[in-house]
Every structure is written in structure tokens, then in C-alpha cells.
Amino acid sequence: QVQLVESGGGLVQAGGSLRLSCVTSGGIVSARAMGWYRRPLGLQRNLIATLPRGGDAAVYADSVKGRFSISKVNNIVYLQMSNLKPDDAADYFCNSVPPIDSSWGQGTRVIVSS
């Protein structure tokens, strides 16, 4: 059974950095491409970073390109976020790409103060 547990969110000033972690189980990391998604308050959840399974280059949404970096070590998927902006405030989730709907975790909240 796939389980995804995100952590690392918090309150940060604009321009600051955070590293999010996603501990996975069930073999998802080795079997599928992985991604980070985010859901700003009141809006829909969108994919912002994809790490292909085969080691190809990661793909980023234009809104985070050059500031965010996705990586994985063993069964943990990371999202390094730098130069954070108020628009980055959201609940962040990891999942496979495409996502397994039954496996969404609780997410981790990022708040960016201006």
C-alpha cells in the first residue's frame, strides 16, 4: 500500500528558503515518476515539479522554474524551495505523476510573509 507523508512546511519570509520532504512507502518511488503538487488556499491543486523515474531531467512549472528543485534519496522525495514569494503560499503534496488518487497525504503548509 502506498503511503505519502509530507513535512517541512512552515512560515518563512519572502526571499527565504524551505526544504520539503515526502517519505514514501509501497515502492512508489522506484516504480513511477514522482511529483510535487501545491494547492493555494481556495484554488485547485496543480503539479509544479516532476522527477522522471528513469533519471531524465526534472520538469518544472514556469512559476517555480529556477527557484525550486525536486530530488529523491531512497524512498524520500524532496523539494528545495528558494527565493520564496507570497504567491508560493499553499499546501504542498507529493504523489506520483500521474497521481494515485487514493494515496494523497495530508500535505504540508507553506506560508510566505511579505
Image (cartoon, rainbow, N blue to C red):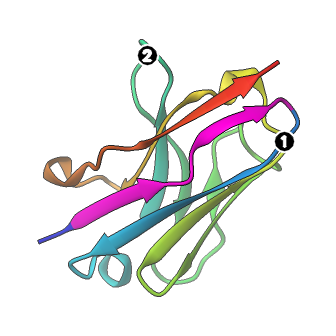
* Quarter containing the N terminus: bottom left
Please identify the quarter of the rendering in which residue 42 is found: top left
Q: Is residue 64 above or below residue 31?
A: above
Residue with the most extreme top position: 42
Horizontal placement of 60 versus 90: left or right? right
Q: Position of residue 22 (x, y in %)?
A: 44, 63
CA gap, disc 1 and disc 2: 23 Å
Secondary structure of the residue carrying tag 2 is: loop
Label annotation for residue 43: 2
Horizontal placement of 3 versus 41: left or right? left
Q: Examine the structure image and report whether residue 5 is included in the region drawn in magenta.
A: yes
Question: Dominant secondary structure of the magenta stretch?
Answer: strand
Q: Which residue is mark 1?
A: 16
Depth check: give the residue in front, 107 or 50.
Answer: 107
Stretch in magenta: 3-14
Which residue is painted at 73% across and 22% down in the image?
86
